[in-house]
Amino acid sequence: MQVKPKQRRRHSAAFKADVLVACAEPGASIAAVALAFKLNDNLVHQWRRGRGAPKALGVPSLGIAEAPPRFIELTVASAMLPAPAPPASPPSPTSETIALEFKYGTLGASVTWPVSAAADCAARLREVLR
C-alpha cells in the first residue's frame, strides 16, 4: 500500500482577501479566524505580513513593520504608586541621570531619573513591572 503525500492547497486571491478582512475586525483573533476558515494560523500570519497576500484586490498588508510609529500615553493610577518624596534639592541640569528605554515592536517609552533618587526609581520600576 502506497501513501500519497498531501498536495498543497491553492487559495484564490478572493479567499485570502476574505481571511484578511476577517482578521482586521476589532477583537478578532488570528487563531480563531484561521480555525473558522480551516487554515493553519501560521499561514494566516504569513498572509498578514504580505507573503502571498492578494495585492491585485487592493488588500493592504497588515504587517507590524508597515504600521506607523505612534506615541501612546500611559497613566498610572495614584492609588497604585505612592507619591514620590520631594527631593532634598532640585537636580542641577548638569547632574547625572538614569536613562531607561523600553521597546516592544514599534512602541517605545523613555524615562529619565536623577541618579540622586536612584532608590525611588527602583521602587517605581518594581511597582510598574508587577
Image: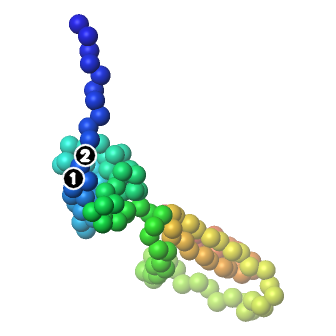
Q: Quadrant of the N terminus?
A: top left
Residue at position x 30%, y 61% from top?
Answer: 56
Give amino acid for label 2: His
Q: Which image quadrant is residue 114 in? A: bottom right
Residue at position x 66%, y 79% from top?
Answer: 112
Asked whether the beta carbons under mark 1 and mark 2 sit within 8 Å of each other, the answer is yes
* Residue 23 appears anywhere in the view: no
In the image shown, does 102 or 10 lie closer to the viewer?
Answer: 10
Q: Is residue 118 above or below residue 58?
A: below
- Callout 2: SS: loop
Circle 2 packing at 10 Å, graded few (<14), some (14-19), many (20+), is few
Residue 60, given in percent of the width and then of the height, sits at 34, 65
- Callout 1: SS: helix
Residue 48, given in percent of the width and then of the height, sits at 36, 57
In the image shown, does 119 or 12 lie closer to the viewer?
Answer: 12
CA–CA distance in space, label 1 to label 2: 6 Å
Residue 77, given in percent of the width and then of the height, sits at 43, 80
From the image, tell me which residue sits under label 2. 11
Indicate left or right for 92 with 15 as reference.
right
Q: Which image quadrant is residue 61 in? A: bottom left
Residue furthest toward the top?
1
Residue at position x 28%, y 29% from top?
Answer: 7
From the image, tell me which residue sits under label 1. 15
Q: Is residue 43 above or below residue 7?
A: below
Indicate left or right for 58 with 120 as reference.
left
Indicate left or right for 7 with 110 as reference.
left
Q: Is residue 7 above or below residue 120?
A: above
